[in-house]
């Protein structure tokens, strides 16, 4: 049985070449997809001063759930987090073990650390119940982009992943928008707040902090490439070349090969030496959040190693 092809409302405009422009992906969560939310987001953009000169919608598409499922887009998008949700403690690096011990005051070898898929069985919960488990701040840890929740005697890795994959099924379409803008970092976050204001006014959201329940946006240059890998297609279902993304071209111009760029996306954990000379690990998405292209390039050049999972 065939799948539906994407519906392209605004075809992608092609790569931008001006020094300050960047393309930020905004895609709606499956449970919030719909014309009402798309319209609210556009009205939020319209509240930004001089938005006509600084922000342009250069792509709008509806990607069918069965199309995304067939290509395994969501699993690939959350690849590292899915690995940890599946394998749990077995993927913890020495650095992660150290941070775990310092945060929870428990020896790593003595802790009941389980992936979220094992937790579904052990705790007898469904995906949404596991995702909704509330814990105190002291019982929560985020390290290398992975979340750990202490629930009773168990330490559950990436408890949200089963719910995310369950919600993104053959029946749940995803609307994808790309905004070409000269706004970076906090300036684009202010645009996000304008979008959120409208969602609040229309009762779609109840607090600013909940906007991530309704939509995702690319929070840094490497996320722009990650989002392009997953969500940039034409009406026949063919993936548009990554050369359409300016940061991808920027990295090519710096001498990275296409394989090296994708390797950073698939294996995003990097090691750095801190001021005291100790090794720290951070996700490339985390460490380049809100940075410019040049700043992101300096960051990856300062890395001492890439952690392979």
Image: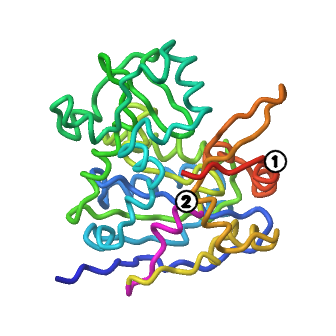
Identify whether 210 is placed above or below 184: above
| Within-10-Å neighbours for mark 1: few <14, some 14–19, many 20+ | few
Q: Residue at x 80, y 66 (%)?
A: 19
- Residue at the far top: name it: 105
Where is the N terminus found, in terms of image quarters? bottom left
Is disc 1 in contact with disc 2, using a CB cutoff of under 8 Å? no
Give how far apart the Cα atoms at labels 1 and 2 are. 19 Å
Q: Secondary structure at mark 1?
A: helix
Query: Magenta stretch containing residue 99, yes or no?
Result: no
Position in image of residue 31 (x %, y %): 27, 51
Which residue lies under the disc numbered 2? 266
Q: Secondary structure at mark 2?
A: helix
- Residue at the far front: name it: 109
The numbered mark, 1 or 2, whose residue comes first in the sequence reads 2
Q: Which residues are magenta?
A: 225-236
Residue 273 vs residue 61: left or right? right
**Camera-side residue of 193 and 272:** 272
Kindly identify which numbered label has been placed on residue 78: none
Position in image of residue 54 (x %, y %): 67, 60
**Camera-side residue of 15 and 3:** 3
**Camera-side residue of 65 and 82:** 82
Query: Magenta stretch containing residue 234, yes or no?
Result: yes
Identify whether 13 is placed above or below 106: below
Position in image of residue 187 (x %, y %): 67, 45
Which residue lies under the disc numbered 1? 302
């Amino acid at each position: 049985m065939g799948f539906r092809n994407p519906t392209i409302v605004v075809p992608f405009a092609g790569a931008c070449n001006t020094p300050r422009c960047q393309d930020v992906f905004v895609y709606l969560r499956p449970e919030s997809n719909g014309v009402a939310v798309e319209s609210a987001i556009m009205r939020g953009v319209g509240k930004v001063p001089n938005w006509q000169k600084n922000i342009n919608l250069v792509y709008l598409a509806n990607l069918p759930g069965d199309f995304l499922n067939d290509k395994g887009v969501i699993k690939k998008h959350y690849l590292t987090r899915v690995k940890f949700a599946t394998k749990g403690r077995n993927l913890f690096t020495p650095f992660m073990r150290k941070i775990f011990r310092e945060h929870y005051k428990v020896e790593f070898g003595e802790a009941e650390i389980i992936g979220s898929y094992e937790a579904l069985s052990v705790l007898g919960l469904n995906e949404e119940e596991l995702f909704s488990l509330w814990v105190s701040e002291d019982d929560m840890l985020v390290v290398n982009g992975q979340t750990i929740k202490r629930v009773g005697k168990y330490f559950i890795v990436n408890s949200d992943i089963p719910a995310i994959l369950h919600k993104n099924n053959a029946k749940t379409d995803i609307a994808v928008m790309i905004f070409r803008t000269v706004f970076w970092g906090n300036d684009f976050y202010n645009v996000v707040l304008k979008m959120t204001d409208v969602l609040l006014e229309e009762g779609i959201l109840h607090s600013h902090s909940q906007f991530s329940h309704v939509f995702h946006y690319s929070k840094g240059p490497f996320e722009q490439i990650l989002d392009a890998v997953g969500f940039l297609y034409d009406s026949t279902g063919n993936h548009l070349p990554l050369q359409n993304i300016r940061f991808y071209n920027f990295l090519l111009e710096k001498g990275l090969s296409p394989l090296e760029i994708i390797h950073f996306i698939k294996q995003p954990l990097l090691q750095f030496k801190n001021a005291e000379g100790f090794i720290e690990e951070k996700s490339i998405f985390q460490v380049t959040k809100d940075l410019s292209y040049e700043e992101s390039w300096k960051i990856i050049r300062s890395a001492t190693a890439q952690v392979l999972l």
